[in-house]
Amino acid sequence: MGRMAVTEELKDLALEQQVLPPTDPPAEEEEPHTEKYVATPHEILEAFDAVSTLRYSEPIHLAGKCQGITITPYSAGHTLGGTIWKIRSPSSGTIVYAVDMNHTKERHLDGTVILRASGGGVFEGLARPDLLITDADRALTVSARRKDRDTAFLDLITTTIRTSHSVLIPCDPSTRILELLVLLDQYWSFQKLDTPICLVSQTGQEMLAYVRSMVEWMGGTVSKDEAGVEIDTSKTGRKRRRDEEEDEAAVGPMSLRFRHVQFFNDARSFLAAHRPEDPKVILAVPYNMAYGASRKIFTELASDPGNLVVLPSIAEPGTLSHELFSMWNERQTDADKWGKGKVGDVARVRESLTIKLNSKVPLTGQELEDYNAREQERAAKEREAVQRAALARSQQLLEADEGDSGDDTDESEDEDDMAIDRALRAGSDDDMDQDIDPVGKRRGGGHDWSMDDADSARHLSFDIYLKGNVSKAASFFKTTSGATQRFRMFPYVEKGGLKRKVDEYGETLDVGMWLRRGRALDEDAETEEVKEAKRKKREEEEAKATPPEPPSKFVSEEVQVRVDCQLAFIDLEGLNDGRAVKTIVPQVNPRRMIIVHAPDEATEALVQSCASIRAMTHEIHTPAVGDTVTIGQRTNTFSIALADSLLASLKLSKFEDSEMAFLSGKVPPHGSSSLPVLEPLSSTSQPLRVATPQEEEAKNSRFSVASLPRTTMIGDLKLAALRSRLTALGLSAEFAGEGVLLCSGGGVGDLEQTVAVKKTGRGKISVEGSTGEVYFTVRDEIYALHAVVSQP
């Protein structure tokens, strides 16, 4: 989804202003460029192809410099692919990075997993981390109920289109737009409306095709739909399957078909297809209206008093969308302003705005003639430069000395033959059996400049190349130096005389030659009907191909827009409000916390809310931009290998994502091994230990006393988790007070079978009650929630 958003922004910018690929900055003597440097589509594709895709709850162990760190993604519930990151570090413990969360279930997404859907409480894997990094951007905000927001949103749209007016909704290109599309498409199907829903986005269709392959990441009503099945609206309520062959869009759930949506690439094509007076619902990108289709369409619709502009999110300051939001918020009463828990009313705006519009227009008239003249002049200069380079290279070859030794002569001959071989092979791309005539293109006079510059230079230099040393005059008499006499000859090499390339496996094969011959044989075996079908298909593809873009220029103009339309803001961002944040953070109960991405007032409000809770940590950091916070300790880690005999004797106990056990051994010296190996201690190498008085007394006694192993329990017991496990086993477990859990088998009143579990201090647990089935069951479940490590 990130690739769609970046590609959309790049294409929108390219339609309005000159952009350049990222290159080195201009030299000091050059004038600085005023254009924006952006990535190319190929670079965007390569960047996102390098991103590794993870599944939710899938732990990944990093390697290299990050060895020992484990990261696990969890669903944040805000956008498709939005993630809460759990990071386990040897030096910093468990770190949970949770920003932009949404605990509310929506139509295309489920809520965040940090809160359990059933039973309440926090997800065990994310509870009690060593460090929690979260945001407080909406800590002072109280959102309206989702039902009220959806009802107000649909009522405003229905009222507007029934009066034959239009609705403009600026939105993002890839994330929250899915919730709007699912909501509108379901409402259109239920109400059987025929008003068009127009999506103006250059990546809209590509984005939806990609979303249909990500149903497993989605939730809400989308995940419950069946592929190719729709619900019959008749009284029977039966399901019927659509004809997949007649429906090209029958891919994925019915909620992602969007049969009422029309797609447009830009504002120009949309305005050409729909008249301004026709009723329609327009979803245009981007959401901030700083550029692109949403800004252009707003200037066309803002002057009609019956049109409606709905803002689903708050954009960054300094943009047109944020300015419209400020206009709406100023016209609300104190009780209806945003963040007070109400939806708010529609505002009537009567103001004049100066909006700057950038556009790309084709060249016409004298500008087009001047452009063509400059292009012809540039092409002529390039041809001259290529010809000069070719002549200079030929002159260097003519003046070169062949060398003094025969070995050098042979090597130069090999290099020359290889160069000729490459030139001949490059000139026969279609069929290796056809005659090769490197100068045939110039027999009719003049040069063939249809080829590229590199090919032209190679052929020019090849035609006038003379093998032999031209600096020495040829003699009629026999030479006395013993060197073989060489004659200057035209460098034509017959195809059969080309040197065969041989490697350690024998003669190398030209795979391209065999592929071309295979294609030629297949074409010869095809019937006339097949050839005609291919020809028609090729013509259709050429007709559908995008024609070459004509010469154009970028223009900028400032227009005065009279804003007389209706204006509304309905929060559809899908983020937690202040009440949810102040409820979730204490339940996570981190040991330390860092608050980021929030204004000072909201940060202080969350800090005071946490300070009022006695069990909540008071080690809360609120760094500003550029501040550094130390979250871990500097430790030295060493790698060591375990011997097979020692590894077989370990009793591993699982705790969270790891398995641990107690061991003792020795590292004998091994000069040949770079990694030390830990081996078990022998019976004779046990460390000497002074016996205690009790052990001396037991030794002198006639009864033998076996020593018990010392056991260490690792973990932090959560009474809520213990209560859930006991309830699943059929036991009754209720909280009798803070830090006390009463467990019973036959009911709360049965005191004989009642066991009390208390947390008396940090790392201390007390289990009180009479021994019996309930007692041992409770003890076993407490052990199961810890990593039990026994020391021999």
Image: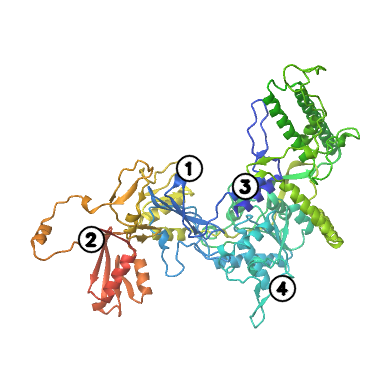
- What residue is shown at x 71% (from left), y 49% (from top)? 561
Looking at the image, the residue that sits furthest to the right is 444
Name the front one of labels 3 and 2: 2
Mark 3 or 2, nearer chain start: 3
Contact (Cβ within 8 Å) of mark 2 with mark 1: no
Mark 4 or 1, nearer chain start: 4
Q: Which secondary structure lies at badge 2?
A: loop
The answer to whether residue 479 is left or right of residue 581 is right
Image spot of residue 645 (x, y percent)? 33, 55
Out of 543 and 417, give the one closest to the viewer.
417
Q: Which residue is mark 3?
A: 46
Q: Could you tell me the amino acid type at mark 4?
A: Asp
Quarter of the figure with the N terminus: bottom right
Q: Which secondary structure lies at badge 3?
A: helix
Mark 4 or 2, nearer chain start: 4
Name the front one of labels 2 and 1: 2
Residue 243's mark? 4
- What residue is shown at x 27% (from left), y 72% (from top)? 776
CA–CA distance between discs 4 and 3?
38 Å
In the image, is residue 112 above or below residue 476?
Answer: below
Q: Which residue is mark 2?
A: 709
Q: Could you tell me the amino acid type at mark 3?
A: Glu
